[in-house]
Amino acid sequence: MRVQCVLCNVVEDIEDYSPLAKRLRNRPIHTYMCDSCYDRIEKRTNERKSTGNFKTYEEKKDEDEWLI
C-alpha cells in the first residue's frame, strides 16, 4: 500500500496487511506520518514537556447527582 506523509509529502510503501494499513483503509480520519516526522514531533514534544509549560487539556466532566 502506498501512503503519503501529511507533513513532508514523502510517499512510502507499507505492507498491505499490516495493522497500520488496515487502520488507514477503514478509518479515513487517521493520517500517516513517516518515521522521521514522527520522531521529530516526539522529540519536540518531550522538550516542551520538560520545560513545565506544556499543558494537556482534559475534558471537564460534571458530576451527575442521579448517578451516585
Image (cartoon, grey):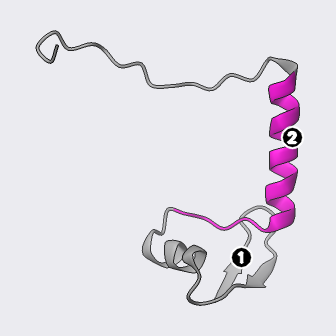
Q: Residue at x 77, y 81 (%)?
A: 11
Q: Which residue is mark 1?
A: 4
What amino acid is at disc 1? Answer: Gln
- In front: label 1 or label 2: 2
Q: Which residue is mark 2?
A: 44
Image spot of residue 66 (x, y percent): 11, 14
Pick the front one: 33 or 19: 19
Question: Which residues lie in the magenta part?
Answer: 30-50
**37 left or right of 18 in image:** right
**47 left or right of 23 in image:** right
Image spot of residue 14 (x, y percent): 69, 85
Q: Evaluate if marks 1 and 2 touch, with contact meaning CB atoms under 8 Å apart.
A: no
Pick the front one: 5 or 21: 21
- Picture quarter with the C terminus: top left
Per the picture, the main secondary structure of the magenta-coloured stretch is: helix
Q: Secondary structure at mark 2?
A: helix
* Label located before the other in sequence (1 or 2): 1
**36 left or right of 58 in image:** right
Q: Is residue 44 above or below residue 21?
A: above
Q: Residue 1's quadrant in the figure?
A: bottom right
Q: Is residue 53 above or below residue 46?
A: above
What amino acid is at disc 2? Answer: Arg
Image spot of residue 8 (x, y percent): 82, 66
Q: Residue at x 80, y 27 (%)?
A: 49
> Real-space Cα distance between discs 1 and 2?
22 Å
